[in-house]
């Protein structure tokens, strides 16, 4: 009888463990939000936009595609952008443009985007 | 995702020569204990120095089994980080000379990873930096078997840059690194959670709510860690503060609902859970689950 009572008492606690929203989840979502804002702010730069346009990428479309990245992808992309050496110089800007190009290429491959007509889609088709 | 590793080559930094305006010309942190390293044991020795400085009672010998990997005759950085957490200390990683100077100026000794050899013939080494002098251009550190030695900034920068300026703080819980930024700091406190150091996690999150009052995750962290400790009344108070400050966040109502429920405040629990469901958002599924559970158990 005591065992049964103990079991009943412990049950709500166990459901509780599943029900609380953990701190880690909230921190990750904050991190992803910051990462997206950073990428969008970089894409809004005039020099980056010119480089993208020169490569046939619509900057507005590029901005929209940032939303198609998962949290993890956005975080890793922002980290890579931040780790590019010596911000502000030509190599850095060129590096960013190449990075953006590659990211958009991959989202095309995944079928999220359709910027590059030469990419054969793996999903949605 | 291989494309994301592109373009990470670092350039040799000259940041030393332009110190931040608010750091003094000369700093030496007093009372950083020294433990001479035995063969290959610079990791345990360096960690023991900053842990004892932060108030932990330990020694290199006691740390060796948890940080040292015999097969590589060294200590890996993640092992150093987790060992600090297991001793209930906040492990915070820095990655630039400027951050190092600011931390030293704030009185925080820093473990640094240096490559004393060459990039293609590395000799990795942990040392504890406790000061610098911009006039003589020297760094003050405990290194290897040398207590309170100094080395030229130029040489130090070269050897440290090869680890991409990896530096580690081990701070008493509730103390913020001088260079702390929101997300990395919260991730450092999350590390205390992983090590199940709940009271220290509470202090860490509370410090974050002081420094960044608008940070939702920090407020939730206080409540979640108190809950994990089993202090339901304090958790209720923390989640109440969270819903007052962030009335649009369903997660705050969800967690408050669960705590109220476990405290037997069923009516309030149902109404908080309903509010979470009303607010919805990406986590609306667990909110609905909480509401269902509460309703089921309250019948």
Image (cartoon, rainbow, N blue to C red):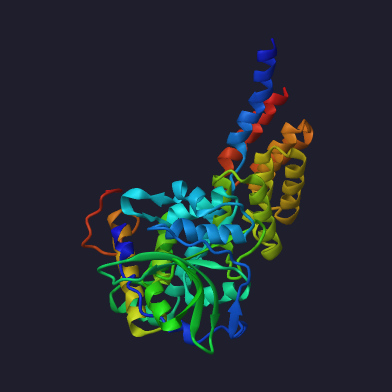
Locate residue B217: give its quadrant.
Answer: bottom right
Quarter of the figure that contains the N terminus of chain B: bottom left
Q: Is residue B292 something that shows in the picture?
A: yes
Is B3 in front, or is B184? B184
**Vertical arrangement, residue B179 with respect to residue A32, above or below:** below
User: What is the quadrant of residue B154 in the picture?
Assistant: bottom left
* Residue B38 against residue B297 in the figure, above or below: below
Residue drawn at x 42%, y 77% is B156
Most extreme residue toward the top, as rendered?
A: A1
Q: Position of residue B33 (x, y in %)?
A: 58, 64
- Residue at the image point whose x is 53% and y is 57% from the top: B48
Query: Toward the viewer: B174 or B259?
Result: B174
B236 left or right of B216? right
On the image, the x and y values in percent for residue B182 come to 59, 63
> What residue do we see at 69% from left, 22% from top?
A9
Query: Residue B218 location, x and y as percent?
Result: 64, 55
Whether residue B206 is situated above or below residue B118 in the rendered picture: above
Going by the picture, which residue comes out furthest to the bottom?
B135
Depth order, front residue of B228/B87: B87
Res A69 seen here: no
Numbered circles on residues, count: 0
């Amino acid at each position: 009888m005591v065992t049964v009572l103990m079991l009943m008492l412990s049950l709500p606690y166990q459901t509780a463990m599943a029900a609380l929203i953990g701190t880690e989840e909230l921190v990750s979502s904050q991190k992803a939000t910051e990462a997206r804002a950073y990428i969008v702010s970089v894409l809004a730069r005039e020099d980056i936009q010119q480089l993208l346009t020169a490569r046939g990428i619509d900057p507005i479309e590029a901005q929209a595609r940032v939303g198609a990245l998962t949290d993890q992808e956005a975080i890793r992309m922002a980290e890579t952008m931040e780790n590019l050496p010596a911000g502000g110089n030509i190599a850095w800007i060129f590096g960013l443009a190449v990075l953006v190009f590659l990211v958009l290429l991959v989202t095309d491959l995944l079928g999220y985007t359709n910027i590059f007509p030469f990419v054969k889609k793996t999903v949605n088709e | 995702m291989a494309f994301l590793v592109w373009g990470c080559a670092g350039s040799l930094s000259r940041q030393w020569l332009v110190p931040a305006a608010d750091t003094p010309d000369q700093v030496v942190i007093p009372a950083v204990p020294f433990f001479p390293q035995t063969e290959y044991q610079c990791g345990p020795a360096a960690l023991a120095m900053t842990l004892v400085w932060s108030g932990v009672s330990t020694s290199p010998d006691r740390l060796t089994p948890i940080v040292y990997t015999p097969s590589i005759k060294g200590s890996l950085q993640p092992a150093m980080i987790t060992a600090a957490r297991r001793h209930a200390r906040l492990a915070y990683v820095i990655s630039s000379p400027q951050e190092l100077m600011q931390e030293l100026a704030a009185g925080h000794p820093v473990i640094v990873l240096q490559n004393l050899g060459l990039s293609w013939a590395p000799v990795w080494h942990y040392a504890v930096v406790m000061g610098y002098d911009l006039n003589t251009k020297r760094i003050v550190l405990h290194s290897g078997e040398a207590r309170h030695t100094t080395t030229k900034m130029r040489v130090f920068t070269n050897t440290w840059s090869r680890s991409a300026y990896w530096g580690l703080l081990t701070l008493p819980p509730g103390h913020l690194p001088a260079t702390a930024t929101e997300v990395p700091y919260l991730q450092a406190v999350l590390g205390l959670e992983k090590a199940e150091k709940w009271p220290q996690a509470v202090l860490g999150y509370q410090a974050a709510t002081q420094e960044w009052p608008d940070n939702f995750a920090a407020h939730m962290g206080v409540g979640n860690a108190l809950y994990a400790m089993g202090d339901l009344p304090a958790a209720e108070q923390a989640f109440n503060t969270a819903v007052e400050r962030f009335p649009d966040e369903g997660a705050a109502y969800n967690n408050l609902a669960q705590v109220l429920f476990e405290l037997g405040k069923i009516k309030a629990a149902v109404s908080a859970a309903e509010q979470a469901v009303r607010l919805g958002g990406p986590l609306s599924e667990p909110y609905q689950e909480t509401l269902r559970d509460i309703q089921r158990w309250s019948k």
